[in-house]
Structures are given as structure tokens and as C-alpha cells.
Amino acid sequence: MAVTMADIAHLRKMSGAGMMDCKKALEEAENDFEKAMEIIRKKGQAVAAKRSDREASEGCVLAAHDGTFAAVVALKCETDFVAKNADFIALTKTVLDTAMERKPASLADLLAAPLGDGRPVENHIVDRIGITGEKMELGFFEYVTGASTISYIHPGNKLATVVAFNRELEYQVARDVAMQVAAMNPVAVTPAEVSQKVIDTELEIARDKARQSGKPENLIERIAEGALQKFYKESTLLQQDFVRDSKLTIEQYLQQQDKTLTATAFKRVTLNPE
């Protein structure tokens, strides 16, 4: 039986594959739609294996929040052309929606989570590889939980943040903090949360700079400690100057709303070179 345009259009709607790929798959499968879908999926697996060593540095980053849970995902690909494709963005949104619904504990759990047809996220990404011919991978999945959460997606879908708070707060205040995280890239919420490895590195850099500038050895540790405090001021969220009003720190900005209000966690995902 000859393959009709209606059959091709139906398979294209089912698979998202191109018209010619659908036509070839239907011809090979003798108009059996299930076999045709399997042919298209196997093509995706073959392309994925062939391009496994390629770099996927472009992609789409999306985030969402719902009460006490917020998540951010990044679906990566090889080119900006594919990253801006409506179907690729829609797949990223589907992955994010799955994360919001199922609240997986890890990226591996999210990849294994089933979508509407019962097949896992990972399989749908492989299907999309067969359609575009590009390497794709779920590069990031991060989440926060708290009494209240917020998400922010920077224009262009290359950068997104999520932040958790210890209590409910006005939407714009929460969004301001999420935008602060996007703009200023803090390493932790407070100095107490900065890893010892980062602290040791900053102190060693400061000591080296002080010695190279000829400072007396008995002042080196004091200078290094001062540099560390400056690092905390610039790189921990609550101590950072608020980008919209540099007279305030983020901690002071939050306490203007309520003395007990604070941020408790954040995640920042970007595909932009920094």
C-alpha cells in the first residue's frame, strides 16, 4: 500500500521527525506506524552513539517554582540553531514539568522518569537526537525546597536561578533576589556555607599577592583575612550589595520586608561562558 501524505503527516505529529524521515520510515515499515516509530527511534540511538564524543555547549535552560519546591533544568545541544527550535524548547519544558511533578532526587532519577507515553525522559531525548542529528544531553537538574520558593529565567533561555526562603514573601521581593543570584553569581548564601576548599584557595591567593607586593611577613595573615572578608562581601548572597540599591545588602533588603525573612538556598545554572 502506497504511503499517503496523510500517513506521513500523522507520523510526523506522533514523532516530531521530518517529513522525509517519516516517509522513509513508513515505506520501510510497510505503513505499520508502530514499526515506523521504532525505526525513527533506532535512528536516534544510532546518531546518539555516533555523536557521543561531540561537545554540547549550547542548549535551553528553564526553571519553575510551585510553593515549597523550585527546579531548574538545562537540556544541552551542539548549536544555537537547535537550541532556539520550538520543539527543542518544548522538550525542555516537558522535562521541567516532569521534574516539578515528580520532584526527583537526582538528575539520574529525572532521566528515568516516565513521560505521558510511559517511556523515560532519556528515551525522548534520544528520539530528538535522531530528528536533529545533534548530540543532546540533560546537562543540569537542580532544585531547592523551603517555606517559599521563586524561579527566574534570564531572557534567551541560557541562564536561570531558583531560590528558597524561610517564609512566604512578596513575589517581587523574591524575584529581585533570584535576579541578584543571576547577575552576581554568589558562591553561597552565607560565609558559613562557603566550602573550606574555597576559603583555603582565597587565603592562599591573598597571601601570594601580599608577598609579591612586598608586604612584611608579620602582616601577611592579617592581609589575607581582610581579603577573605572582602570575598565574603562580594560572593555570599546575603552580604552582597543589592544590585538595584547598593546602599543595601541583600540581607538588609530582605529584613526591610520582615526582620525574620532570609534566603535559605539557591541554585544557578548557565550555559553562558563566564
Image: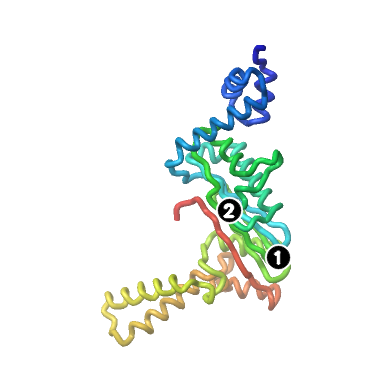
Amino acid type indicated by mark 2:
Leu
Residue shown at the point (39%, 76%) measured from the top left = 203
Residue 186, labelled with which disc? Answer: none
Where in the figure is residue 31, as x and y percent of width and height? 66, 19
Q: What element carries label 1?
A: strand
Q: Indicate the colouring scheme.
A: rainbow
Q: Where does the C terminus fall, quadrant-wise?
A: bottom left
- Report crowding for label 2: few under 14, some 14 to 19, many 20 or more residues within 10 A (C-alpha): some
User: Is any atom of residue 12 visible in this view?
Assistant: yes
Left or right: residue 8 compared with residue 189:
right
Q: Looking at the picture, does residue 87 appear above or below residue 106?
A: above
Q: How many marks?
A: 2
Classify mark 1: residues with Cα within 10 Å, few (<14), some (14-19) or many (20+): many
Type of amino acid at the residue the image marks with label 1:
Ser
**Distance (Cα) linking label 2 and label 1:** 23 Å
Q: Specify the quadrant that holds the N terminus.
A: top right
Residue 73: percent from left, percent from top: 59, 51
Quarter where residue 182 is shown: bottom right
For discs 2 and 1, the disc positioned in front in the rendered view: 2
Report whether residue 156 is seen: no
Which residue in the rendered view is the most extreme toward the bottom? 218
Q: Contact (CB < 8 A) between labels 2 and 1? A: no
Q: Residue 47 placed where, x, y %?
A: 49, 34
Q: Say which residue label 2 marks.
A: 107
Q: Which label is found at residue 148?
A: 1
> Percent position (x, y) of residue 180?
57, 63
- Residue in the image at 53% along x and 50% along y: 139
